[in-house]
């Protein structure tokens, strides 16, 4: 089986990862069904990368239909240690202007009907989510932002809370004001339970969020529409891909240890020998330590 160090999950408007060599399309099966699409494996400057279009190429899956468990399980089967998530978001703060980028350091989960754990079926785990984002991966994204050229003055915000709603409808004005009152900076529909599952799979996770609109709270701006969000995202897509590529290079060079990599050491409550056989088969790939990738990568 192919191995990858870094998984890139491309969101709305980001259905491919340019610049990969030795590309292969992988169909990976998981106990939770198929991922959103084939996983595109390739090397970027010698670093093995697995790219997955969150909504499928052609944008076929609404946020609630994205098979989050299959996506994370499949990336983990490939040995992925770091996930870069690329996402469109609405801004809930005046200072986060449309086209700005933000690296969330917190998530608020307002989703209602998504499978959000690999555990159950006789296996109990409670992973820590106090700090859901890996600071090292977030730093690499921020450094990558600084190092890539912008043809327009886009600003980066290095922290903020991302509130994740069920969707697919955008929020009502009352909800938008409520999320602002919670202290959230940006709003989206996909990063939960993705970030929770990444933590359960012991993968370090961070998101590059691209503001496309002011949702519907702003007194002087029109309420968001999908067409406006996509149009604004398209303006930023090439830059986002450059940032991801540079972050991959930085992560590949540094391969930082993350507390996410040992999340189950303290999180798994049921003793391994007490796990039902079928359940063990499902979670075994999550428990295996992920190995740093040697300089000369073997496949
Ligand atoms: C088309 S705008 C709404 C859509 O975009 C975001 O998805 P992603 O995080 O995959 O970029 C948002 O969460 C909605 O799913
Ligand atoms: N305003 C918004 N609400 C939820 N998801 C979004 N993605 C982009 N803009 C959004």
Image: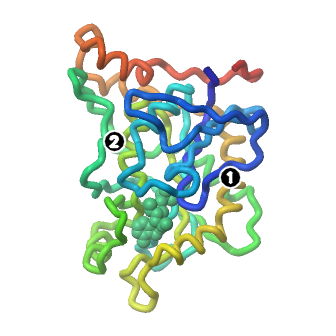
Residue 142 quadrant = bottom right
Q: Is residue 278 above or below residue 250?
A: above
Instruction: Label 2: state its secondary structure.
Output: loop
Q: Please give the label number shown on residue 144.
A: 1
Q: Position of residue 54 (x, y in %)?
A: 51, 49
Q: Position of residue 9 (x, y in %)?
A: 55, 47
**Whether residue 189 is visible:** yes
Q: Position of residue 62 (x, y in %)?
A: 41, 57
Instruction: Label 1: state its secondary structure.
Output: helix
Q: Nearer the viewer, residue 66 or 172?
A: 66
Q: Please give the label number shown on residue 129.
A: 2
Q: CA distance from mark 2 to mark 1?
A: 25 Å
Q: Please give the label number shown on residue 112.
A: none
Q: Nearer the viewer, residue 288 or 94?
A: 288
Seen as rendered, the residue at the extreme top is 273
| Residue density around tag 1, few if under 14, some if 14–19, many if 20 or more, within 10 Å | many
Is disc 2's CB within 8 Å of ligand 1? no
Q: Nearer the viewer, residue 263 or 299?
A: 299
Q: Residue at x 65, y 62 (%)?
A: 237
**Whether residue 186 is visible:** no
Residue 4 quadrant = top right
Q: Where's the C terminus, which quadrant?
A: top right
Residue 92 lies left or right of residue 6; in this view the side is left
Q: Are marks 2 and 1 in contact (CB under 8 Å)?
A: no
Q: Residue at x 36, y 22 (%)?
A: 282
Q: Residue at x 26, y 32 (%)?
A: 126
Q: Earlier in the sequence, mark 2 or mark 1?
A: 2
């Amino acid at each position: 089986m192919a191995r990858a160090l870094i998984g890139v999950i491309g969101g709305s408007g980001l259905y491919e990862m340019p610049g990969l060599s030795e590309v292969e399309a992988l169909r990976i099966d998981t106990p939770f069904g198929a991922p959103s699409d084939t996983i595109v494996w390739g090397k970027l400057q010698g670093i093995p990368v697995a790219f997955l279009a969150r909504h499928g190429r052609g944008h076929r899956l609404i946020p609630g239909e994205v098979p989050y468990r299959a996506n994370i399980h499949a990336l983990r089967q490939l040995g992925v240690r770091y996930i870069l998530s690329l996402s469109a978001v609405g801004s809930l703060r005046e200072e986060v202007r449309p086209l700005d980028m933000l690296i969330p350091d917190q998530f608020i989960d307002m989703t209602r009907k998504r499978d959000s754990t690999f555990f159950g079926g006789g296996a109990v785990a409670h992973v820590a989510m106090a700090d859901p984002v890996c600071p090292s991966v977030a730093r690499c994204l921020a450094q990558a932002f600084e190092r890539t050229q912008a043809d327009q003055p886009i600003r980066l915000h290095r922290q903020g809370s991302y509130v994740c709603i069920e969707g697919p409808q955008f929020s009502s004005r009352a909800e938008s004001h409520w999320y602002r009152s919670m202290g959230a900076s940006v709003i989206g529909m996909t990063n939960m339970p993705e970030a929770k599952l990444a933590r359960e799979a012991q993968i370090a996770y961070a998101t590059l969020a691209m503001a496309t609109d002011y949702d519907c709270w702003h007194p002087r701006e029109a309420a968001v529409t999908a067409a406006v969000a996509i149009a604004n995202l398209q303006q930023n897509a090439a830059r986002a891909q450059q940032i991801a590529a540079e972050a991959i290079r930085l992560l590949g060079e540094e391969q930082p240890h993350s507390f996410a990599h040992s999340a189950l050491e303290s999180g798994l409550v049921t003793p391994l020998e007490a796990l039902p056989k079928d359940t063990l088969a499902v979670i075994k790939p999550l428990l295996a330590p992920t190995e740093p990738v040697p300089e000369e990568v073997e496949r």
